[in-house]
Amino acid sequence: MKKHILIVPGDGIGQEVTAVGKQVLDRIAEKFNHEFTYDEALIGHVAIEATGDPLPEETLVKMRASDAILFGAVGHPKYDNDPSAKVRPEQGLLKMRKELGLYANLRPIKLFDELLEASSIKADILRGADILFFRELTGDVYFGKRERLEDGNTAYDTMIYHKYEVERIARKAFEAARTRSKKLMSVDKANVLESSRLWREVIQKLAPEYPDVEVEHQFIDAAAMLLIKDPRRFDVVVTGNLFGDILTDEASQIAGSMGMLASASVGDSTGVYEPIHGSAHDITGKGVANPLASVLSAALMLDISFGLKAESEAIIAAVDGVLKDGFRTRDIADTTTDASKILGTDAMGAELLKRL
Ligand code: NAD
Ligand code: IPM
Ligand code: MN
């Protein structure tokens, strides 16, 4: 198979982990006789530095011309600590999602058995947890009207959803539920928010079309509690952009670390495969970032965008193999980890390649 992949590392550890993700794609191409060609493009802080724009037109053109995109992360402390900055790295990410019509963000919470002890949640509560989040990605308060009033002392952001936006993400989640345990949880705040009441209404109206799927509604506050109390109660979850953002960072603790969570952003055109974590400037340049979220994002790309199931499973098996052999990055090490098996980003990548 011939495919053209755009690598968009972005900022901070995005650069470090995406390099490993690309090496793994390369090895897969070699092993399974595919021809992957690559290009690279700028986004975020590095793009602002080079061009003044967090998503330069050149990047967007390259994105549209590629078969899939491996994305790293955007962000820089300079902006995090300067609320007045008008041009910000995160604008590049949001514009990319909107421009490419990436309305569905799939965030699988895959718990590798070997990492049961890496989580701060008790192993007995965690064992067997397997969740697939559908986070809506191009609507909500992220893309509503926002303003700082002239006096400077008042600001608002509008939480807005259209029926068609809820419907299309819900359909994807219903379809996925059919292939799993036939249970779908929808998370909203319909006891307070009008946009959530619309959300719930749309889900309720769709449900009869999927009579084999059992639908449960939860409020976001209760869902956040239940996720820690009883993660196995969750299977397929569908929720809005903001609630999904927060809930999946929480859910990363089920998998052991932010450094383990991959995602697929799909919709109208080219799919973007991205770790859920950010640019992590607290560890940037130290060579300790966990590259597995990027590697598992590459696995999602092969499966979802290219239909290469065996190739995708080979990557997951390699990750499993590395963990079974006791290798860990710092974020997923625990008190029982042999110090000589705590690896940096590149060494972890090298162990993976050995198993591919
Ligand atoms: P973050 O995800 O960057 O980091 C949160 C914590 O998790 C940090 O302690 C970090 O060291 C750790 N961590 C994250 N990824 C890791 C990995 N692969 N290996 C080991 N440890 C890892 O979130 P933050 O600190 O809230 O945000 C930092 C910047 O990243 C901000 O500018 C934010 O806007 C941006 N951000 C971008 C994305 C994205 O591009 N998709 C996502 C989240 C945050
Ligand atoms: C993510 C990030 C982004 C989001 C930020 C950086 C805009 O947290 O990809 O989860 O909130 O969607
Ligand atoms: Mn996030």
Image (cartoon, helix red, strand yellow):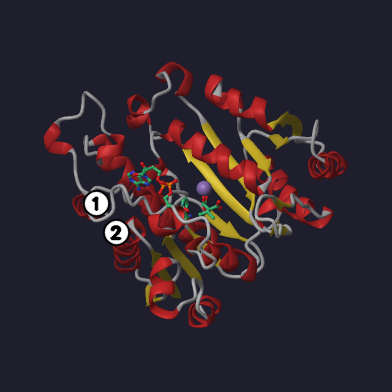
- The image shows residue 92 at horizontal and vertical percentages of 52, 67
Q: Residue at x 57, y 27 (%)?
A: 227
Q: Which residue is mark 2?
A: 16
Q: Secondary structure at mark 2?
A: helix
In the depicted view, which residue is nearer to us: 193 or 164? 193
Can you say whether 61 is above or below 194 in the image?
below
In the depicted view, which residue is nearer to us: 216 or 248? 248
Quarter of the view holding residue 34: bottom left
Image quadrant for the C terminus?
A: bottom left
Labelled pair 1, 2 in contact (Cβ < 8 Å): yes
- The image shows residue 270 at horizontal and vertical percentages of 57, 70
Q: Which residue is mark 1?
A: 345
- The image shows residue 109 at horizontal and vertical percentages of 50, 39
- Residue 300 visible within the image: yes
- Residue 308 visible within the image: no
* Mark 2 CB within 8 Å of ligand 1: no
Q: Residue at x 24, y 51 (%)?
A: 345
What is the three-letter code of the residue carrying label 2? Glu
